[in-house]
Structures are given as structure tokens and as C-alpha cells.
Image (cartoon, helix red, strand yellow):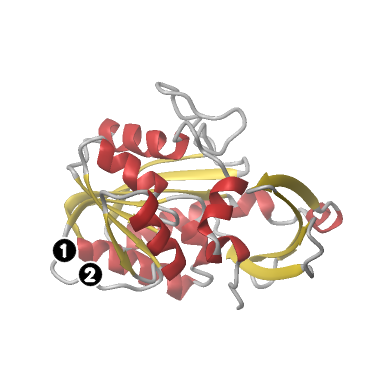
Amino acid sequence: MDDANLLTDNPALYEARFPDPQRLAGRWAEETLRTYGSGPRVLDLGCGTGRDAAYLQSRGRTVTGADLSDAMLRHASREHPGPEYLRADLREFDLGPRRFDAVVCLDSALLYCRSGAETAGFLTSCRSCLHPGGLLVAEMRNGAYLLGRATLAEAPAVHTFTHRGLVHRSVTRLRVDPAARLLHRVRTWTTDDGSPPVEQRSAWRLLLPAELREALTAHGFDVLALHDGPGPRTEPPWREGDPPAGTTDADRLHVIARLTDG
């Protein structure tokens, strides 16, 4: 699967397309970690530009950010210093003797595990780097919500924004493949300077809540919460003190699990 991504290759453009001036994702992760009693050492898997890792670091945690994109890691080190940043593939990784009190995996990064085997590799790796009793906190799109929604293919999403004086326009088309349990995404980029269009293709796993719960349990995790929001990317968005809804039938999925044995 081709994961070439204009935004991944251009982290400043990513932050312009998905601004988070209030650090909502980082604040949600911090409150979740605090609510469930996490220790200070945190691994942010799929850390991207480093915004969330740096926020957690600013709250007194010792954070390691890991990502597969060298461009993202360079940007994170330069623009969001404080955490340690290193290259790792979340589908299977070995960070040596490092051990953490929590693993955070935000913005659907976990869904790049496109098969049960890759999800198992992710959970096995998380288990190996967590202290007993450590937390796994993740948020992602909900496969149960997306499966069967054929209208996704009929309604492309169009977004326009300006970055460094240049107008960027993206047209995103989604296609659900129920047999393969994948959400395919084709995004076409154009700019107002006459550059040729850029097309990127990627896919996410349509992970079901029950499937996620079963996989976590099989890898020694106790699921403490599994809900559809509110969270950093729900509508309306999460605010400090908001209790979780407790259901799993909306577009977003949030999970908090504790490693019961090491």
C-alpha cells in the first residue's frame, strides 16, 4: 500500500491543514493519563509533528515521540523540542531497554495496522515496552461506523486553506472495502500557483470495537474504557471534565487499557 503523503512529507503544511492552537489532542491525552493514574514516562507512537508529545512534556512528563517519517521527526525536533524523538514503525518496534508508564497513539495512527497480524505486532510491541500496570491510550476512527456507508464514495470532501501565501485545495474521496475491511482514501492536491496536481493514496483498517477489545484482552490488557467520545476530534469537541459517552456507535473511537501483566 502506498502511503506517500504530501502532508507527511511537509510537516509545516500538515500543521496548517490541521491546526490545533488550543492543543486539544494533547490536553485530552494529558487528562486521560492523569485520570487513570499514569506515571510520567510516555511513548507517543505516530507522534507526527510532535505537537502532542511536546504538550505532554510541558506538563511534566518525560516523553519519547516515535514516527516512521523522517521529515516529521526533523520538524518535531526543531519546532517542538523537549521530547526525545526516534524512528520506529508502530506495527512492530523494539526500543531496547526503554520502559514506559503509558503509550499514547492518537489521530487514527493505530489504523495503519491493516491486518490482525499487524495489530498483534503493535500490541506485542506495546506490551514489551510498558511497565506492568502501564496504560495504552488511543483514539481513532470507528470501523463499525464506517462499514457499509457506501455514500462515502459519492461525497468527496473539499478543503481550502492558505499556507505561506499559497492557496492549497484538497479533494478527498473515501471508499469502504468491506471484504478487505479497509477504508481507502484518495486525496488530490492543487495550488493556485499552477503546479501540477498531486495525488496520494492510503488506507486505514476498519477496526471494530469488539475486535479491538478482544485483541487487547488477548495481549494482557484490561480495557478500562471504550467509547465514542467526547474526544479531541469529535463534534462537539471534548472539554476538560467531560465524561465519556460510553457508547461505541459514532465516528470516533477512544480506548484506555491497562497492562495487567508484564
Disc 2 secondary structure class: loop
- Confirm whether residue 69 shows in the render: no
- Confirm whether residue 18 shows in the render: yes
Q: Nearer the viewer, residue 35 or 180?
A: 35
Q: Nearer the viewer, residue 163 or 44?
A: 163
The quarter of the picture where residue 124 lies is bottom left
**As drawn, which residue projects farthest toward the right?**
154
Disc 2 packing (10 Å; few <14; some 14–19; many ≥20): few
Question: Position of 226 compared to 103: left or right?
Answer: right
Q: Where does the N terminus fall, quadrant-wise?
A: bottom right
Marker disc for residue 254: none
Disc 1 secondary structure class: loop
x, y percent for residue 72: 44, 62
x, y percent for residue 229: 52, 34
Residue name at image x 70 percent, y 66 percent:
178
Marker disc for residue 98: 1
Mark 1–mark 2 CB contact (< 8 Å)? yes
Marker disc for residue 95: 2
Which amino acid type is shown beneath numbered disc 2? Leu
Residue name at image x 46 percent, y 56 percent:
212
Which amino acid type is shown beneath numbered disc 1? Arg
Question: Position of 205 compared to 158: left or right?
Answer: left
Disc 1 packing (10 Å; few <14; some 14–19; many ≥20): few
Q: Is residue 207 above or below residue 38?
A: below
Residue name at image x 39 percent, y 67 percent:
90
x, y percent for residue 241: 40, 21
Question: Position of 156 compared to 234: left or right?
Answer: right
Residue name at image x 22 percent, y 40 percent:
38
Question: Position of 261 compared to 210: left or right?
Answer: left
